[in-house]
Every structure is written in structure tokens, then in C-alpha cells.
Image: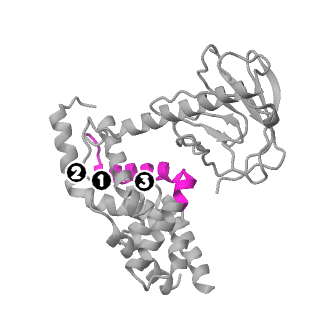
Amino acid sequence: MADHTMIEVTQVHEDLYARYGDDLTRFATGLVGPSDAADVVSDAMVHFWRSRALVDADNPRALLYRGVLASARNLQRSRFRRRAREQATAQRLVSHDPEIRPDVVAAVLQLSPRQRACVFLAYWDDLGMEQIGELLDITPGSVKQHLHRARQILEEVLDE
Amino acid sequence: MSERVDNELRRVATAIAEVSPPKPELPRPDATRQVPRLVIAAASFLVVLGLGLAASLLFGPAEPRASGIVPVPEQHAANQVLAQEAGPSEIWNLSVEMGFYFACGMGRGLESCVVWEAGVAVIIPYRVPEGATAEVSTPSHEGRLEIPFEAGEPIAVVHESGPFTILQHVPGVDTPYSYSTDFPPASNP
């Protein structure tokens, strides 16, 4: 890895964050809800500062998404806070759009972080499986499986 | 898959995007975000030590153990404090349940980790059959600990394939401990 001055590193981070920060925060919201999204993004960016991995990355956008996903997964490992967080997220979503079914929201919030990531990127960003796979560093086949599983779960909820 | 499923998912994804907060300010290299974690880790460790000392004062000393191991009440049949030193790729792991101090460490790449919470037991998606026991052997102490987990209670397991090693840096003890379980790990949900 080439040596970079702090000024260069700072510039790279600022440029990338200006370009992708909003998308990353929306992505983080999809993973952990609105209350913790900012923390997840911040944690990921702190990690990138330390590692300087973004500076020479071939695909910094993908790296950023993976960093946010990793940060979200760390957060999700705490079950005690997760329940409270998901309840708050569910209430927030239902309040925002009263036509959203609470059981659908609950089902989505039960998905694993990776499944949620695939759902959000497919249904909000309208990305294809290859693009999602590239962002999350998983195969398109895995993306397909995650989406299939998410749809299956929703199908069961909607059939009840 | 049905169109209605896609519509519902799209609706939820849209709502998520719309309730998303503004992006946070870009943290800088001198960001203090690490400090809260260190403060939490240090505070939690002090809580654990304090609880251990209180227990030893209340219930008297247990049989001699390797240096750095804090005894807990005998009725809990567990009496080990395993301090795990966190490295840059590791996470502090400590679970405090039922007066029993159980800690294990893990390295990068392992999925089953016990994430440090400020003095609170944490989560692992594994299930333990009732009456599960664990054996602990150390350079200076061998024995069988009865860990009174409730059926279905989550327990920290470091490695999916069963026996795992806890590398620890208990003061006065230099060699790694070996910790084996005699129950099969459940599948990770």
C-alpha cells in the first residue's frame, strides 16, 4: 500500500463520504433502524480512518457498504438492545406510512442483517443481484437465496 | 413470487429510506468514538472485579486457584473469572449471569462471539441443553464445573465445532486455558 499523507487520506474520505454518505445512512437505517443508523455509519468510517482501506481500494463504494454492514452486524449481536431497537423502528415505520402492515414490518425486522441488506438494496436502490453481490461481497446466488428467503417469509405472513 | 410480496417489500424499503436520519458528520481520525467503548470496557471490568471481590468477602475464599481467578458463591458451582484481553481484531467478551463469570475470547472471522456489554450478559444464538456441564482445565487447576444454565438459555460458544481454546491473560497465569464443552453446539440461526 502506498504511503499517503494525512491530507490525502482526509480528502479521499471526505470525497467518498460526500458522494455516498446519504446512501450509506439509508442503508444503515435499513439494517438497524433510524435511531442507530448514524452510529453504525460513524463506526464504519472510524474503522476506515484507522485502516486507510478506502484510499487504495479498487471499489471504495463496495468497501463502504461492507463496512456499514459489518458495523451493523456488530450492533445486532446485542440482543437486549436489538429488541428495543426493532420495536422502535417498527413503530416509526408504521407511523410514517399507516398503510404498512405491522406484521410485514415485524417480519422484515426479523431478517438477518445480510438478508435485510439484500432486500433494501433490491427494493429501494433497485439493484440487480450482481450489483448487490458486488457491494456485499457475496455471490449473486447468495443474493438470490437471501431475497428468496425474505420473500418466502413475507409470503407466509401475507397468507395468514 | 407474488407481486404483492414485492409491493410490500418495496413499501417497507421506501419507508425505511424516508425515515432515515441525515448522514452523521464525518468522524475525524481523532474522533472520540473509541473512547466510549474503552470507557465501557474499563467500567465493565471494574464492575465484574467489584462483584467478584464482594462475593469473596461475603462467602469467604474458595479453594486455591490459579492467580487471578476470582471465586464466586459455591452454590453457583462456578468460580472462574477469565479475563480476556482485547486486541485490535478481538472483542471483549464477558458474560455475567447468576453470579457466574464466564468469559471467552474470539478472533477475527469467527461468527459466534459474545459482545461486550457494560456488565450485562450478552448474546449468542446457541442453545444449551438443560444440565449442560463444562470442563475446565488449567495448568494449576483441573475440575469439572457445573454450569447451571437454564434449558434453552443462550451461551457463548467460540467455535462451532465444539472444543475451543480461551486465550487469556489472567494476571500470574501465562499459559492458555483449555475449555471444552460436552454438549453439541446448536445450529446458528
For badge 1, the amino acid type reads: Arg
Which amino acid lies under the numbered mark 3 shown in the image of this protein? Leu
**Amino acid type of the residue tagged 2 in the rendering:** Leu
Q: Are marks 1 and 2 in contact (CB under 8 Å)?
A: yes
Q: Quadrant of residue B54?
A: top right
| Residue at the spot of label 2 | A16
Report the span colored magenta.
A56-83
Q: Secondary structure at mark 1?
A: helix
The reply to whether label 1 and label 2 mark residues of one chain is yes
In the displayed structure image, the side of residue B15 where residue A79 appears, left or right: right
The crowding category of the residue bearing disc 1, from other C-alpha atoms within 10 Å (few below 14, some 14 to 19, many at least 20), is some
Q: Residue at x 82, y 25 (%)?
A: B143
- Classify mark 3: helix, strand or loop: helix
Out of A79 and A58, give the one closest to the viewer: A79
In this rendering, which labeled residue sits more in front, label 1 or label 2?
Answer: 2
CA gap, disc 3 to disc 2? 17 Å
Picture layout, residue B11 above or below residue B45 = below
Q: Which residue is mark 1?
A: A61
Would you identify the image quadrant in which residue B47 lies?
top right
